[in-house]
């Protein structure tokens, strides 16, 4: 992306999902837009200033404002260095005369995107940030998170308390009390972002400045209000935020069962399953019935099923029951449990001229292509085929759609595609995708949290007693 560098500034009270939003935005920009993003979290700098986590920290306590200001200045100093624009001085202005020290070996800026994760809950704090960031000549996007739903707020508070280092050494029964006290303390001074009215009378120089920054307000994680959206990257971020929600729901990833091409060591194609693959399909159907559909206990929950458009994934998912539980869709129609949604965007990486070959045949007939693929699987494109980078572009739309889904989802797809989905959901660099293990006969359960992703692996390998030793499935080829 060649547009202006971007700084996202979070605004809101504690426990309103700011860290969750900033984490998801970071993963999205890095994975789909190839941006190097760094998050500067005030709380981390405040803990360093205090030398230890402090669950009882209050903004109104004596000396607290000095601690907060020092934490903010440290965060901004690191941000200025990250952008390669010099050194931070205490009056809030980067010294551009010394910028060369902070640049890369060829003179380029070190970073192009940053996120400031903090409360920034007063007009004065936001005005200080605006003045400080102005010399960097970056596009500033203010993202305010407001939660008025009591149930959502309670879930956010519990999750924040569990993940915050401040509360790790505090007895569990005291955590909620201390955190609510901190929220109430900040709430007394909280000043929401003031939006301009249609006639402009409420537009103040303190809030808006004369550079018309981008404003985004998210209410209860669902309703967005935006203003001054400029550039393709910011537009993509708004689209992603429109789909994103904070409901914790598991996402299950499974490769198809062993296909005829797997057994022969061939890549690509559209072959069906072997007997061993059909045995896995039966195990997957049982797993979906007992684990996924009843994720919250004995009573069934609404679930979704996504597959690619290729025969081997369709056959793998064919045994999963499509029941009609007592649920309806948003438009009042009956909800069909595990109704398969087939997406061509989830098809395996296309091997082009190499489709149907074994790797031994490719090495023998096309040694230069074999060597090029071995050197960099991420960027290598099969002749008249695809690369991992092409797949990233291809799965962009379904991954944004997945962010909107609130029900558990089972995705039955292919190795290269699932590697990329896994890296996106867990926040791993896309460069790691070609080396991620995504084995046959395994189901990977992912549950995203504010700061990461919980993983659980289920082994559904069919009983080998059904097959003679000579018919044991070989290791499948790896894209």
Image (spheres, rainbow, N blue to C red):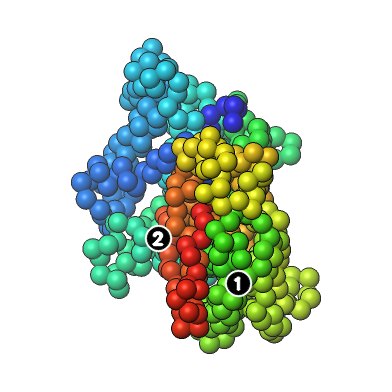
Q: Quadrant of the N terminus?
A: top right
At 69% from the left edge and 83% from the top edge, which residue is drawn?
323
Secondary structure beneath label 1: loop
Q: Looking at this rendering, what residue extends furthest in the bottom direction?
A: 298
Name the one closer to the observer, 208 or 343: 343
- Looking at the image, which residue is at 27% across and 62% down? 168
Residue 361 visible:
yes
Residue 117 coordinates in the image, percent (x, y): 43, 44
| Place of residue 263 in the rendered image (x, y in percent of width and height, measured from the top left) | 55, 65
- x%, y% of residue 180? 38, 63
Q: Mark 2 highlights which residue?
A: 160
- Graded by Cα atoms within 10 Å as few (under 14), some (14 to 19) or many (20 or more), the crowding at tag 1 reads some
Q: Is residue 396 visible?
A: no
Judge left or right: residue 180 versus residue 152: left
- Name the one closer to the observer, 322 or 219: 322
Q: Residue at x 40, y 30 (%)?
A: 82
- Circles 1 and 2, Cβ within 8 Å, touching? The answer is no
Q: Identify the element where label 2 is drawn.
A: helix
Residue 170 quadrant: bottom left
Label 2 neighbour load within 10 Å: few <14, some 14-19, many 20+: many
Q: Which one is nearer the viewer's eye here, 345 or 48?
A: 345
**217 or 125: nearer the viewer:** 217
What separation in Å lies between label 1 and label 2 (alpha carbons)? 47 Å
Tag nearer the camera, 1 or 2: 1
Q: Is residue 13 above or below residue 338?
A: above
Q: Residue at the location (29% across, 71% down)?
A: 172
Can you name the residue that lies furthest to the left here? 51
On residue 274, which mark appears?
Answer: 1
Write down the quadrant of residue 46 in the picture.
top left
């Amino acid at each position: 992306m060649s547009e202006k560098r971007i700084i996202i500034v979070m605004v809101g009270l504690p426990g309103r999902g700011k860290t969750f939003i900033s984490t998801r935005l970071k993963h999205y920009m890095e994975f789909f837009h190839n941006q190097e993003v760094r998050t500067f979290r005030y709380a981390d700098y405040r803990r360093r200033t205090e030398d230890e986590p402090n669950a009882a920290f209050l903004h109104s306590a004596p000396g607290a404002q000095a601690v907060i200001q020092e934490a903010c200045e440290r965060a901004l100093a690191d941000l200025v260095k990250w952008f390669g624009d010099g050194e931070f001085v205490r009056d809030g202005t980067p010294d551009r005369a010394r910028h060369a020290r902070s640049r890369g070996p060829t003179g380029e800026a070190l970073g192009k995107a940053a996120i400031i994760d903090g409360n920034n809950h007063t007009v004065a704090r936001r005005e200080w940030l605006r003045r400080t960031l102005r010399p960097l000549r970056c596009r500033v996007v203010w993202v305010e998170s407001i939660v008025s739903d009591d149930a959502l707020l309670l879930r956010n508070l519990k999750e924040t308390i569990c993940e915050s280092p401040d509360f790790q050494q505090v007895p569990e029964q005291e955590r909620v009390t201390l955190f609510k006290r901190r929220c109430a303390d900040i709430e007394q001074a909280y000043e929401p972002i003031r939006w301009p009215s249609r006639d402009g009378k409420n537009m103040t120089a303190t809030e808006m400045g004369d550079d018309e920054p981008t404003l985004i307000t998210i209410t209860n994680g669902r309703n967005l209000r935006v203003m001054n959206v400029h550039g393709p990257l910011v537009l993509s971020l708004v689209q992603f935020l429109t789909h994103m929600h904070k409901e914790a729901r598991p996402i299950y990833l499974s490769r198809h069962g062993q296909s005829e091409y797997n057994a022969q060591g061939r890549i690509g194609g559209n072959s069906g399953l072997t007997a061993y693959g059909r045995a896995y399909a039966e195990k997957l159907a049982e797993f979906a019935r007992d684990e996924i559909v009843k994720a919250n206990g004995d009573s069934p929950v609404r679930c979704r099923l996504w597959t690619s458009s290729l025969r081997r994934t369709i056959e793998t998912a064919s045994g999963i029951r499509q029941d009609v539980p007592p649920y309806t869709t948003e438009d009042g129609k009956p909800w069909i449990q595990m109704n398969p949604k087939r997406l061509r965007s989830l098809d395996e990486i296309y091997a082009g001229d190499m489709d149907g070959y074994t790797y031994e045949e490719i090495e023998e007939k096309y040694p230069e292509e074999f060597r090029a693929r071995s050197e960099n699987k991420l960027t290598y494109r099969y002749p008249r085929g695809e690369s991992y980078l092409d797949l990233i572009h291809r799965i962009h739309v379904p991954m944004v759609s997945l962010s909107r889904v609130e029900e558990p989802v089972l995705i039955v797809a292919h190795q290269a595609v699932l590697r990329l989905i896994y890296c996106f959901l867990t926040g791993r660099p896309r460069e790691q995708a070609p080396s991620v293990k995504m084995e046959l006969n395994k189901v990977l359960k992912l549950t995203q949290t504010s700061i990461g992703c919980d993983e659980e692996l289920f082994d559904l390998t069919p009983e080998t007693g059904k097959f003679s030793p000579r018919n044991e499935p070989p290791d499948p080829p790896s894209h």
